[in-house]
Amino acid sequence: MPPMPLQQTLRQPISFAGLGLHSGNQVQMNLLPAPANSGLRFRRSDLDGHPEIEAKAEFVVDTQRSTTLGRGNIKIHTVEHVLAALAAAGVHNAIVELDANEPPIADGSSREFARLIREAGVTTQSDSVEPYRLSEPIEVTVGDGHLAAFPSDCFKLTCTSADQKGRFTQHFSLVITPETWEIELAHARTFGFFEEIEYLINNGLIKGGSLANAIVIRDDAILTNEPLRYAEEFVRHKMLDIVGDLALVGRPILAHVIATKPSHQANTELARAIVAQMKQPARVAQTFAPPPSPTPPAAQKTACNASSHTSRSAAAPASPPLPEGEFDSLDTMQLMKVLPHRPPFLMVDRITRISGNKISAIKCITMGEPFFAGHFPGHPVMPGVLQLEAIAQVAGVLLIRQAKETGKIAYFMAAEKVKWRKPVLPGDVLVINVEMYKVRGKIGKARGECLVNGEIVSEADVTFMLTDP
């Protein structure tokens, strides 16, 4: 077996200044070397304490036209172009230091960032890094976008892009290496359709956008201040975005990703799914009970003969028992082994803490949520009843754990003292806190609150019952 490659960081610091895409303000960016095993991270030098956000999928809080990372009240917008340049160049550890809430947009591609990394140089570190090879295929569908990732011995992208009207359909495929990245993808500029850009401008976004850093498509006309850099520049930029968004996995991946009409939301959902698969063996050991002992041959035969007569409740797959005591996190994949809900009706992204009769969770609200299409067009607001549903789902997880019942469903029975105090908007991170104050048999009562930025936006007392599916 060949030795694992060594981690790499920048040989020296290097700086770049330019306009931020959304703010239109001047931004100073410093790319800094970082110790082994620290990963890629963003630092806000303009804020007290110089807070940092790790470039990980779990910190994605918005994917409207770009990828935004957030932690608490700190946000970094449009991270994908810088991350693509660092990850594709083989930089595993670095700090992107900013004096604003977004990197410079430069010319709308990763060309300037690739140049900076080349000038700074890359150096190896003492610790190794093991690329993750997918154990099985992963598939993600978001709206019209579809991404499928398959195990491979390299990192390869195959992408088809088009707008909703099927205009400018393009296809390209490439094995990603530091050399192919800089030649074939790094120079591809961001682009947008005029009707989309008009909406963003009217909503106070892309104040720094211009033909100097984006291509605009209006009907069949391509508006640009220079000729296209590639015949397939649009799809190549989509692939650039995929490289940047998949850098949020946190380590190199060995996979062939086939994408049709990708988006930042779909890309980051795939990143989350890869992380979940990557952590699955450890989580199975930590979170779920060990598998049952092998069934004796005679019992297997009896079970097979009786399979056609199994009752509905016996046939229902048992949800794995939740761990005892306090623990920090259950991600979406684990939640779906406990709750029967599935997207788009799964209103919880992650359980962040269970301790005694209290539980906390988060739901990241993105513009891609299906309910925003009709609630309300031009003024997206999360329906209050779905916040109430989020409280009920989180409370159901706690009741299942406390009752130590497997294969059960927590049915929502009643809601009292319901109050909705403030609207929940795209980009908000909904924090759901629930405290169970009464459990009698299979019936539980709990008090729940939803918060955004520490302020209560909704609250309710909920009652529910455990029963067979």
Image (cartoon, grey):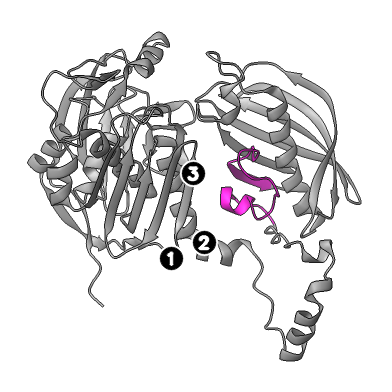
Q: CA distance from mark 2 to mark 3?
A: 21 Å
Dot 1 corresponds to which residue?
Answer: 135
Q: Are marks 1 and 2 in contact (CB under 8 Å)?
A: yes
Magenta residue span: 325-354
Task: Name the residue nearer the viewer: 59 or 306.
Answer: 306
Q: State the mark number for residue 141.
A: 3
Dot 2 corresponds to which residue?
Answer: 280
- Expressed as whole percent of the image width and height from the top left, the position of residue 219 reads 30, 18
Q: Is residue 327 visible?
A: yes
Q: Amino acid at mark 3?
A: Thr
Q: Amino acid at mark 2?
A: Gln
Residue at the location (44% across, 36% down)?
Answer: 265
Number of labels in the image equals 3
Question: Judging from the image, what secondary structure is the residue with disc 2 in?
Answer: helix
User: Is the residue 242 above or below the residue 310 in the image?
Assistant: above
Disc 2 or disc 3, which is closer to the eye? 3
Q: Amino acid at mark 1?
A: Ser
Disc 3 or disc 1, which is closer to the eye? 3
User: Is the residue 301 above or below the residue 172 in the image?
Assistant: below
Q: CA distance from mark 3 to mark 1?
A: 20 Å
Q: Is residue 331 visible?
A: no
Q: Taking 467 as reference, is 200 left or right? A: left
* Precedes in sequence: disc 1 or disc 2: 1
* Precedes in sequence: disc 3 or disc 1: 1
- Expressed as whole percent of the image width and height from the top left, the position of residue 346 reads 64, 41
Task: Mark 2: give few (<14), some (14-19) or many (20+) Cα within 10 Å.
Answer: some
Question: Judging from the image, what secondary structure is the residue with disc 1 in?
Answer: loop
